[in-house]
Amino acid sequence: MTKSLITGTTGMVGSHLAEFLLKKGEEVYGTRRWRSRMDNCRGFEDKIIWVNMELIDAHSVRNAIEKIKPDVIYHLAAQSYVVDSLDEPTATIEINTLGTLHILETVKEMKKREGYNPIIHVCSSSEVYGQVKENEVPINENNQYRPASPYAIGKLGADMLARWYFEEYGLKTIRTRMFTHTGPRRGDVFVVSAFSKQIAKIEKGLQKPILKVGNLESVRTFADVRDTVQAYYLLTKHCKPGEVYNIGGSRTMKIGEMLKILLSFSPLKDKIKIEVDPKLLRKTDVTYQIPDTTKFKKETGWDSPIPLEKTLEDTLNYWREEIKR
């Protein structure tokens, strides 16, 4: 039985990955902190073997990995909100880069001491590419880096560390640069969930029929989180250590077009007004993200079959249920 450790288990992606691996019959270990919210793991929380771990505490990371000795480490934990990274750059870099370093250093020392060398999936981000030029899309893995936030810089640091630890110490790191992915359990600061939560509150009379938005002209390629975790699983089974892979969906559109689809699922769609909130606009924004996923699909056969319409409707229904709690 494969023994898998997921960092960031209580987040959207981590919780879906844990649920997916449990269905595959794997032994799933999840990291959490004393302040972690467990809502995302509701219904299968007791099937996960929990371990307390704080990424920025090297002692904590070492203790967890030495105790578990997982066959696969899915390193998903991060300070993942770009806007917060602008206000908290030090904390973001510490978590996203230094936290990754602590994992890699622990495994390096264990490999040297006892030959332990698990597969380590280091989850980077499409944000490392920054604002690309029109002639650079679709974006492949060799595209220039132009990180446009402390979040993106922190992720690029983690990305490069993972590559270097493979080259220098032979650690079996595999990097992914995931493009926009969403679905049920996504935090309400992210665009699809932010819109969905507002619509759900409007439907219940908890908010005036005014939907606050940011830049609706940004172009994104959307993937469902449930397709994403399948991709991560296939990555650890079929892909080569030392390599980096773009992963993303197949539906590309402006945020405004996505919003129209999302609103179509609400009985109040004709009564809701759209209003731009200046606080939701960024001075430096990444507005043009279209991935080239040829490399990953060729090696794994992965696809993203869940239609965007289902992703959006499921996310809206998730928030309809959440605001009742």
Image (cartoon, rainbow, N blue to C red):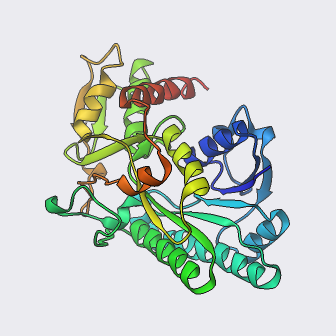
Judge from the rendering whether residue 93 lies leftward or rightward of residue 40; answer left or right: left
Picture layout, residue 59 above or below residue 39: below
Query: Which residue does the image show at 58% across and 80% down from the upper left?
Result: 165
The quarter of the rendered structure image containing the C terminus is top right
Q: Position of residue 176 (x, y in %)?
A: 48, 60
Q: Can residue 179 be seen at all in this image of the molecule? A: yes
Q: Which residue lies furthest to the top in this view?
A: 267
Q: Say which of 42 and 168 sits in front.
A: 168
- Quadrant hosting residue 104: bottom right
Query: Which residue does the image show at 64% across and 39% down from the upper left?
Result: 20
Q: Which residue lies furthest to the left in this view?
A: 135
Q: Where is residue 74 in the image (x, y as percent from the top left)?
A: 63, 58
- Quadrant hosting residue 51: bottom right
Q: Can residue 209 be seen at all in this image of the molecule? A: no
Query: Which residue does the image show at 19% across and 45% down from the upper left?
Result: 217
- Quadrant hosting residue 309: top left
Q: Say which of 272 and 68 sits in front.
A: 68
Q: How many marks?
A: 0
Picture layout, residue 177 above or below residue 37: below
Judge from the rendering whether residue 290 lies leftward or rightward of residue 204; answer left or right: left
Q: Where is residue 10 in the image (x, y as percent from the top left)?
A: 64, 48
Q: Say which of 3 and 125 sits in front.
A: 3
Q: Which residue lies furthest to the right in this view?
A: 67
Query: Which residue does the image show at 82% across and 62% down from the upper left?
Result: 68
Picture layout, residue 299 above or below residue 20: below
Q: Say which of 96 and 267 sits in front.
A: 96
Q: Position of residue 301 (x, y in %)?
A: 47, 45
